[in-house]
Image: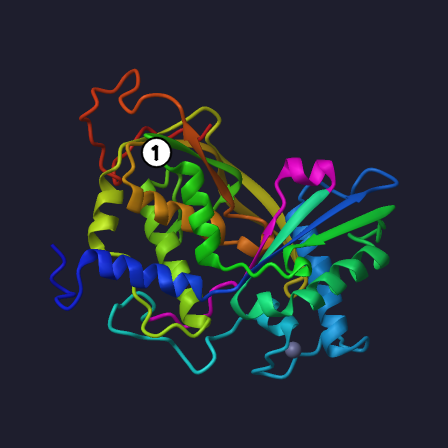
Amino acid sequence: MAQEHPGGGMADRLAAYRRALESVPMVTIRAAWSWPVRAPRAAGGPLVRSALGRELRRLTHGDDAGPEPLPAGCSCPYCAMFERRSVPGGARRDSSGWVSGLDSAPATWRMRCSRRDWDRGSFAIDLYGPSAERWALVVAAIEGMARRGLGGDRVRPRSLKIACDAMNGVPASLGRRIEDCEERLAGADSVRLVCATPLRLLRKGDLVITPSPGLIATSAARRAAALAALAGARPVPGPPTDVLNDAREIPFGVAGGWRRVAVTRYSARQGRRHPLEGCVGQLAIECAPADVLALLAAGSVSGVGKGLTFGFGTYRLVADDEPCAGPGTDGNRRSSGGTGPPNATS
Ligand SMILES: [Zn+2]
């Protein structure tokens, strides 16, 4: 029962939520390169992020832009992507409560660079909303950073190939990408959520070691709604409360290899290195209703949790062929998201 929305049924509310996500433009840039020597360091995401930021800043604020602070409120692509301060026009609030209290804008891009991607010489960048419209400048910045080199030694790749879906004039949106993901999963009884990059969900400042599907779905829904708000959707409807309640009830377990990892990032502003922690591995999710899968799909397409621009928070959803009530379950068992499975932190 969703008493807070007497005017519209569940289906209406879900449809409105989907429409809002359709309005968020999304562009994906893929880069592949080969290195003359061993690629610098293993933590590819933070390294590419820092080189990309330097280059975008050069392109937007000029060669001379030193360490001095940039003009407050600048909305150039560099400042919008690397100097997130607040949502233009102040905190977005609406009656749904989904983005109320939001005083900093959602990240309008994410880096996808797993360890495997980095070893193979590739990474991808997804741009959402206002950043998607500036894809050409981001492509130029990737070319520039390859010319100038990465890392302390400024190692330059021998070759660079860039592909961008916007180059083909194919319009894409967050909503449509989510639908593509849902179509892939249609009919699946259970899915595996595969985190190739660390998932960093915090609760009261602490890393959540075993995030439940409910927590992931809620976080994904909140982020998608914030991106829709930034793209101008009004009002921004959250998904039906029932769907989130369903998500909280879904049985799940950690599959092999679930563990806590730390990636080192260098903060130029503070002049020192920080460990950034998250979890990688797989979660096995059973019997998820289609509406819940839609929220998990949203998280797969938009990224979930902290550190998205450092290459965190990207996961894939893979349909599992195994029957819903697999070995070791009685088919009726429900584990609540709060207690969940045993931790596998090794
Ligand atoms: Zn700027």
Residue 81: in sight, yes or no? yes
The image quadrant that residue 232 belongs to is bottom left
Quadrant of the snapshot with the N terminus: bottom left
Residue 137 rendering spot, x and y as whole percentages: 71, 68
> Which amino acid type is marked by label 1?
Gly
Q: Residue drawn at (58%, 83%), measured in percent from left and top?
A: 72
Residue 259 rendering spot, x and y as whole percentages: 47, 32
The image quadrant that residue 223 belongs to is bottom left
Q: Specify whether tag 1 is near ligand 1 (CB below 8 Å).
A: no
Residue 303: in sight, yes or no? no
User: From the viewer's perspective, is 322 left or right of 242?
Assistant: right
Residue 170 rendering spot, x and y as whole percentages: 60, 58
User: From the viewer's perspective, is 102 left or right of 287?
Assistant: right
Q: Residue drawn at (76%, 64%), measured in percent from left and top?
A: 140
Mark 1: which secondary structure?
A: loop
Q: For the view shown, which residue lies furthest in the top direction? A: 327
Q: Is residue 202 above or below residue 39?
A: below
Magenta stretch contains residue 26: no
Residue on which disc 1 sits: 187
Magenta stretch contains residue 105: yes
Q: Quadrant of ligand 1?
A: bottom right
User: From the viewer's perspective, is 83 left or right of 154?
Assistant: left
Q: Is residue 238 above or below residue 290?
A: below
The image quadrant that residue 329 belongs to is top left
Q: Residue drawn at (52%, 64%), measured in percent from left and top?
A: 25
Q: Residue drawn at (47%, 75%), measured in percent from left and top?
A: 86
Q: Is residue 265 above or below residue 25?
A: above
Q: Which residues are magenta?
A: 101-121
